[in-house]
Image: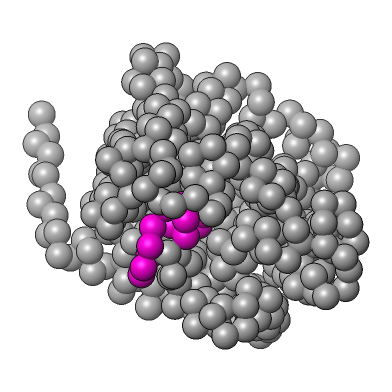
């Protein structure tokens, strides 16, 4: 019997290699990563201020503002369900340009809304702002599936895992940058001034895709990957190219993942822990600005964007150190680590519990979220990555809708505007949120016997 040599990993090398790989990535991936960096900055920058924007400029209360944020975030996921397949039909480059133009127009309307109409629920400013949200929803519904499809197309079997991890990390680096950009601009020019900066950055993103991700660059990247494909993969490509449009449509319907009960359970059981993502923009901005005083309250937009910075640093390291670990076990461990620090916030609002929550939650997120996105992309049949990413994230749509429906009520009850911090009861709010989030890892543990074989078969 042949003895297997166990490779001894150098921890420092595992940490450094992801960043070296990013530097040496081909031009096509650089184009995707730079675009994703700017879009992460812009998306999270707009999102972190959106509830307060609707409070202050459109005249909505916490419940109404929370629902508007929910319409944006949930609308994006629903849009992916219907528009995610766009990239499979028109190609990565065109899909990215179309999506960014939609988002540019949407952000223009959102920024101009307060000055073009009258504030109040269903008043003219509200309708213009919702038109802006529609543009962002349509654009982002195409954008994210296009980026993940690009990583699948521009990487090989050996580089795919790190490609997905780096894309996720880069987006979160962009998500941290509003912490540096937003506070000084907001203090001088208000939220509207910050939003104009994000409009300009959207234009920059369009130029990056148009120039760096040129047609020639895309063709070279695809040709390079094609050289490293196996015979099986090449045969699959030939089969897809020979299909007529009608045959492709039939192929799409036959390969929809809704027939796989394990897949559907797997994506839906993540809803409870994913509510913590939604609280990053539905609850934390108001929590930091109302339940705290001093530095945290005055610079709430810095603190709400620390999670993306931690994700950028930790995700490539975690991906490198856990690349050979069982997917399902990583999902259990990751969701448990992510949910558990919510109970720290039940100790009351202070700097130590905030940092403990943000750091531990981020470690958990880095353990499972990129692996989930990679898994969905990899099990997708040929030329169906976009639609699989859209369907795989449909529960994320439900998470955003559900969380937005109750987060405003909890804020008004436990963390209301104008009340002294010592009179609030934020501890009870976070205790309830912790019990909700912990449902995911518990359910994954209970379903392990049923889930394991089917999941690993698909993943392989």
Quadrant position of the C terminus in the picture: top left
Q: Where is residue 136 in the image (x, y as percent from the top left)?
A: 74, 61
Does 45 sit above or below residue 1? below
Identity of the residue drawn at 75% across and 37% down: 252
Quadrant position of the N terminus in the picture: top left
Residue 31 or 243: which is nearer the viewer? 31
Does 329 sit above or below residue 97? above
On the question of residue 446 being in view, the answer is yes
Q: Where is residue 401 in the image (x, y as percent from the top left)?
A: 66, 38
Identity of the residue drawn at 63% across and 73% down: 191
Q: Position of residue 209 (x, y in %)?
A: 65, 77
Which residues are the magenta region?
284-296
Does 150 sit above or below residue 324? below
Identity of the residue drawn at 73% across and 53% down: 60
Identity of the residue drawn at 80% across and 41% down: 248
Residue 170, quarter of picture:
bottom left
Residue 217, quarter of picture:
bottom right
Does 195 sit above or below residue 366? below
Magenta residues, dominant SS class: helix
Q: In this view, does 339 lie to the left or right of 304?
A: left
Q: Is residue 456 left or right of residue 133?
A: left
């Amino acid at each position: 019997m042949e003895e297997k040599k166990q490779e001894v990993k150098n921890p420092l090398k595992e940490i450094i290699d992801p960043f070296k790989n990013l530097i040496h990535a081909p031009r096509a991936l650089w184009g995707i990563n730079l675009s994703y960096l700017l879009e992460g900055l812009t998306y999270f920058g707009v999102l972190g201020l959106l509830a307060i924007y609707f409070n202050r400029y459109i005249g909505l209360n916490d419940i109404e503002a929370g629902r508007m944020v929910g319409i944006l975030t949930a609308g994006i996921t629903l849009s992916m369900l219907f528009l995610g397949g766009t990239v499979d039909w028109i190609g990565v480059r065109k899909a990215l340009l179309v999506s960014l133009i939609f988002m540019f127009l949407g952000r223009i309307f959102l920024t101009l809304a307060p000055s073009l109409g009258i504030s109040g629920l269903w008043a003219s400013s509200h309708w213009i702002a919702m038109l802006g949200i529609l543009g962002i929803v349509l654009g982002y519904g195409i954008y994210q599936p296009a980026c993940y499809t690009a990583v699948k197309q521009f990487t090989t079997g050996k580089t795919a895992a790190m490609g997905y991890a780096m894309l996720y990390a880069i987006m979160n680096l962009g998500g941290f940058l509003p912490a540096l950009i937003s506070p000084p601009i907001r203090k001088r020019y208000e939220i509207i001034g910050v939003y104009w900066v994000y409009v300009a950055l959207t234009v920059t993103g369009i130029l990056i895709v148009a120039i760096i991700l040129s047609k020639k660059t895309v063709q070279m990247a695809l040709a390079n990957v094609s050289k490293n494909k196996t015979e099986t993969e090449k045969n699959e490509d030939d089969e897809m190219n020979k299909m007529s449009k009608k045959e492709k449509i039939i192929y799409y319907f036959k390969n929809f993942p809704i027939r796989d009960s394990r897949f559907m359970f797997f994506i839906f059981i993540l809803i409870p822990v994913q509510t913590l993502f939604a609280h990053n923009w539905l609850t934390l901005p108001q929590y930091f600005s109302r339940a705290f005083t001093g530095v945290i309250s005055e610079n709430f937009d810095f603190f709400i964007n620390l999670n993306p910075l931690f994700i950028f640093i930790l995700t490539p390291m975690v991906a490198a150190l856990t690349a050979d670990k069982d997917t399902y076990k990583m999902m259990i461990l990751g969701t448990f680590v992510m949910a558990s620090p919510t109970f720290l916030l039940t100790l009351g609002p202070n700097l130590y519990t905030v940092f403990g929550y943000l750091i531990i939650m981020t470690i958990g997120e880095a353990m499972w979220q990129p692996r989930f996105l990679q898994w969905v992309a990899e099990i997708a049949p040929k030329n169906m990555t976009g639609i699989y990413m859209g369907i795989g994230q449909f529960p994320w749509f439900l998470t955003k809708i559900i969380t937005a429906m109750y987060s405003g009520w909890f804020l008004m009850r436990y963390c209301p505007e104008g009340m002294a911090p010592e009179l609030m009861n934020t501890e009870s709010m976070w205790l309830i949120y912790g019990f909700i989030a912990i449902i995911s890892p518990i359910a994954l543990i209970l379903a392990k016997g049923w889930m394991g074989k089917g999941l690993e078969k698909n993943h392989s």
